[in-house]
Amino acid sequence: MSTVASYVPPRPGVRLSGDTGTGPHPETGRPGPDGTGNRPDGRPDAVADADPVADLSRRVLRPLARRDQRRSGELYIRGLLAATGRKTIRNIASHTGVPADAQRLHHFVSDSTWCWCPVRDALARHMGRLAPPRAWVVHTATMPRTGRGGVGVDYFADRGTGRSANAQRAVGLWAASERGGYPVDWHLQLTSRWLDDAHLRAQAGIPADTVAVDGVGAGLEMVLDTAPAAGAPRPPVLLDARQASAGRVAALLGAGGFPYLLRISASQLLSPLTADGRGTGRAVTARRLAGGLAPRRFSRVRTPAPGTGHREVARVPCQTADTPPGPRRRQLLLAQRDPFSPLDTAFWLTDLTALPTGALVRLAATPAQLAQDVTVTGRRVGLYDFEGRTFAGWHRHITLASAAHAAALLLRSRGRSGLPPTDVTR
């Protein structure tokens, strides 16, 4: 089980990394004569080795214009790593030992003017260097709430049971790396309750240009806008397109230079291809296309997803029937069925036609393998704890909680059981 390191508060009379005595480099925010934070011999700054939280805070909070904002940001990140239980502002600030910090951090998240988008880009860049994504996963999180006042709270249908629950719902862009999973961008889903009520909208400070976007649309927007910040090469995108036009989703990702593995519905229309790659001119559902295959077309593969065991897997060259006009790329239907219950079949669409079947099956299991980081680590750093009433406050909190999540991942991968004391002055 992953653990989040315990917190060692800054020693009295010392400065946090965002507030060095001589001041950071005016452009990079890093110390050092060359502005890179490297030693004269070019090796990385020793602070990154001694305190990865300080290093992450400096790099990720660099877009914040003011020194006091960067200092508050690091206090907030360290507080999220330190606090136990629900991550209220008072709880987050309790480890600083300064009573006024609760009000200060409340203002920093709820009332300040800093923009979260550049911070998220900086997080993607920093983690793209330390924990390069091997896949991007679009994940939807539903956070149950008791009251109705928190921004975005409404009744949402549970996708498993179909029952409605009072909750917030957010779509996150998660990187799956060799070190584990971490989020870099978020979209808060707003219903007509919030978008059509002028009073609620003004009360929450929802920007005038904010419109309703479904989970697939939000995921695509985040992939195309934020994922490139992590650098090249671009890894495949895993996205649930069962409620969308898979052809349109695939075309948008392909145009953005992202390979993809999309979960599609059994009723998705596909055009099978001949052996030489030509279309047959007919469109059939994914279930019918896979169901018409001879038994020899299926191979038995062990899946790494928890609790799934072996699956019978087939691959069929195809193209989506709903692809928009324009260049067409060869695609592949991947069908995974339970050998004891053939109707229990999952369908995937990909343009990774050169990958062997086993590699595609392992890639398809990535969302399930991220579950511990999404749930356990996510809850421990307060990803889902914000119940404030403002749109900007929600985005600022979840941005800083994403940075804390990344810090917890770095500490875990180094086998650390606690944060080192900061050795720079407060």
Image (cartoon, rainbow, N blue to C red):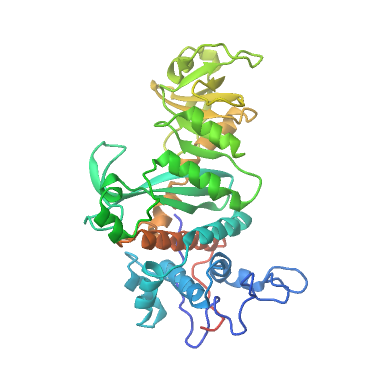
- Residue most toward the left? 147
| Residue at (34, 65) in percent of width and height | 87
Q: Residue at x 33, y 61 (%)?
A: 390
User: Would residue 78 be seen by someone viewing this image from the given angle?
Assistant: yes
Residue lying furthest bottom: 13
Horizontal and vertical percent position of residue 34: 73, 73
Q: Is residue 411 left or right of residue 150?
A: right
Image location of residue 279, percent across then percent down = 59, 14
Horizontally, residue 396 falls left or right of residue 122, namely left
- Is 197 rendered above or below residue 118? above
252 relative to 16, above or below: above
Q: Position of residue 32 (x, y in %)?
A: 69, 76
Q: Nearer the viewer, residue 137 or 422?
A: 137
Count of numbered labels shown in the rendering:
0
| Closer to us: 312 or 335 | 335
Q: Quadrant of residue 201?
A: bottom left
Residue 332 drawn above or below residue 48: above
Q: Is residue 381 visible?
A: no
Q: Residue at x 40, y 51 (%)?
A: 209
Task: Using the image, determine if residue 133 lies above or below residue 61.
Answer: above
Q: Is residue 322 left or right of residue 198?
A: right
Left or right of 169 in this view: 222? right
Q: Which quadrant of the rendered structure holds the N terminus?
A: bottom left
Residue at the image position 35 percent from the left and 82 percent from the top: 99
Q: Residue furthest right?
A: 41
Answer with the quarter of the image where residue 218 lies: top left
Q: Could you say where residue 172 lies in the image, as x and y percent from the top left?
A: 44, 49
